[in-house]
Structures are given as structure tokens and as C-alpha cells.
Image (spheres, helix red, strand yellow):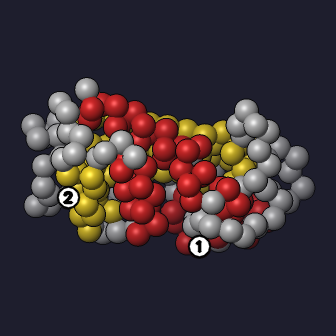
Amino acid sequence: MKLVNRILYFATGNEHKYREVASILNEANIKVEKFLVDRIEIQDNDPVKIAKFSLEMIKDAPTRIFNEDSGLNIKSLEGFPGPYSSYVYKTIGNEGIIALLDRKSNREAVFYSIIAYKDENDKIHIFSGETKGLISEKITGGEGWGFDPIFIPINEEGNKLTYSELGFKLKNTLSHRSKSLEKFSKFLSR
């Protein structure tokens, strides 16, 4: 396949996500251009179905195009907000998530990322990654967007910092998105 040093198109309207994805794939010598879209998503609990459907709905798309969908599953909230993370962030934000967890001792969460890639033969390939962590008790500053100020990834070093506090570069080595993109870049480089 060897798509290293060839351009791929990332279907997104999210500038923050584009910066992260382009930065991570650039490390693997994969160049990404943004293909601006307003995504159409089905309402479903299956993130793979959502990612596939969104990719299939893009009209006049170039070949070698992909999208990425992510969600935050919070254990004590029965996996909420899950695939509805973007909507929940826009409506209740980080403050709302923290309020929902008030008086809950279990703050375990999993951030997941699903990539759907349509190759030059119109075949769709799926890549996934996840990072286990905890929801912090307060919003912390630093770099980041979305739920970054409240998600603490669990790693071998015993990290107690949120994605935001870790900063852009370190977050990109630990994140759910980096894990799915690593699988994706290995697929493209074979």
C-alpha cells in the first residue's frame, strides 16, 4: 500500500481535531489535508456505524479520505455520554459532566477514537483506539479542548494530570486518538 509521503484527506470541520491528527500523522510522514465537511451523523450507540455512515454520506469526496469519531464513556453514568459526547459538550460542557458526577466515588472513564478510511477502491477500513482514565473533580487549565480539561489518562507513570495539563505534544503520545492513528498509519505503511 505504502501511502507514506502521499496526501490523505481528513473529513472534518473541527480545527482542533485537524491539528491533532495532522501532527500525529506527520510524525509517520503521512501528509493530511482537511476536506471541510459538516458531518451528518446517525443517532446510534455503535461508534463504528456512526463513523462509517458519516464517511459514506460525504458527497464529491476525493479518494483516500478518512474521518474520526470519538466519545467519552463514563462508567458510573452507564457509558454516557458515549457517541453523544459532542452534543453533550456543546450543551452542558465540562461543568455539567462534573455536576453529574457529584457525590459519585467511581470516576472511571474511557475515551475512544474510531477512524473510518475509504481507500481508492471505495473499501472502508476501521481503526480504533482507547485510553482509560478518570474524570477530574475540577476543570484544569492548560492546552486542550473539549473534555481535555477533565480527563486524566491512566498510564504507567502514575499520571495525575488531565489531557489539558499534559500539553499538546505529550497528550498526542497518550491519547485515544493517537492509538487509533498509530494503527491507521501502520496500515498505510505496509
Total count of labels: 2
SS for callout 1: helix
Image location of residue 186, percent across then percent down: 34, 31
Q: Which mark is residue 58?
A: 2
The amino acid marked with disc number 2 is Ile
User: Disc 2 or disc 1, which is closer to the eye?
Assistant: 2
Q: On the picture, is 160 further left or further right than 83? A: right
Whether residue 121 is visible, yes or no, is yes
The quadrant of the image that shows the C terminus is: top left
The quadrant of the image that shows the N terminus is: top left
Q: Residues within 10 Å of mark 2 (few under 14, many from 20)?
A: some
Q: Residues within 10 Å of mark 1 (few under 14, many from 20)?
A: few
Q: Which mark is residue 91?
A: 1
Q: Between residue 74 and residue 63, name the one nearer to us.
A: 63
Tell me which residue sits at (77%, 44%) in the image: 159
Q: On the picture, is 124 further left or further right than 45? A: left
Residues under numbered marks 2 and 1 in contact, where contact means CB atoms less than 8 Å apart: no
Q: On the picture, is 165 further left or further right than 6? A: right
Decide which of tag 2 and tag 1 comes sooner along the chain.
2
Tell me which residue sits at (12%, 55%) in the image: 62
Image location of residue 144, percent across then percent down: 60, 65
Tell me which residue sits at (41%, 69%) in the image: 15
- The outermost residue toward the top is 190
Q: Between residue 33 and residue 114, name the one nearer to us.
A: 33
Image location of residue 98, percent across then percent down: 77, 63
